Amino acid sequence: MRHSDLIVIGAGPAGMAAAATAAGHGFSVTLLDEQPRPGGQIYRDVDRVAARRGDILGADYTYGSRLTTALRHDNINHVSGAVVWAIEDGFRVSYTRDGAGAQVSGERILLATGALERPMPVPGWTLPGVMTAGAAQILLKQSGVLARRAVLDGARARRVVGKVAAHRTDGCAGRIRRSCRCPRPASSSPASRRR
């Protein structure tokens, strides 16, 4: 069984940064992630996609390639395709990769399991072509596919549409529907900010 000073679970932005920082300080690091390539949801497949669609996805996205490059440090053992299924006392982590079980032990564990999209079910949300903003992002990053006609629904839809629309060539940004108008806390109301 391999032993590391630090086991990081998750190779998204936080996991990659933590692994690189620890390795830079002399720690041996095992980085486990379920995906075939590092990046998480935010920097999904950045090493392959940045050169092809970096102009559409922007500098924030292409920055992720700096983090993936840092994983090439001699002190980092990046295990992709690893499905973690147990963490035991003494920091022993069990995982499956390519259908075979394996374990790694460590002095410390850092959980960086990443972002999770939580869609709100609405009538018609299971129809063909209906997807969450996260799914649309994955489609763009993985396949370069961007809908010609889209309706984005949600509290943060304007920001997503604005970013994509700035890079669209056909001038059609889609429609926006805000389904959630959450009340502001009293401390953030315009009146309280003037005081």
Image (cartoon, grey):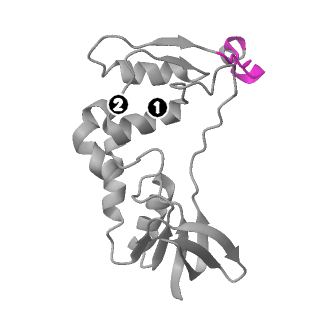
On-image quarter of the N terminus: bottom right
Q: Residue 24 location, x and y as percent?
A: 39, 71
Q: Residue 129 location, x and y as percent?
A: 50, 25
In the image, the segment drawn in magenta is 179-191
Q: Is residue 99 left or right of residue 46?
A: right
| Three-letter code, disc 2 | Val
Looking at the image, is 82 positioned above or below residue 74? above
Closer to the camera in the image, 116 or 188? 116
Read off the residue under disc 1.
136
Q: Is residue 136 left or right of residue 132?
A: left
Task: Please name the predominant secondary structure of the magenta segment in the image.
Answer: loop
- Residue 35 falls inside the magenta stretch: no
State how far apart marks 1 and 2 are (Cα).
Answer: 8 Å
Secondary structure under the numbered disc 2 in the rendered image: loop
Q: Are marks 1 and 2 in contact (CB under 8 Å)?
A: no
Read off the residue under disc 2.
145
User: Which residue is at the far front?
Assistant: 128
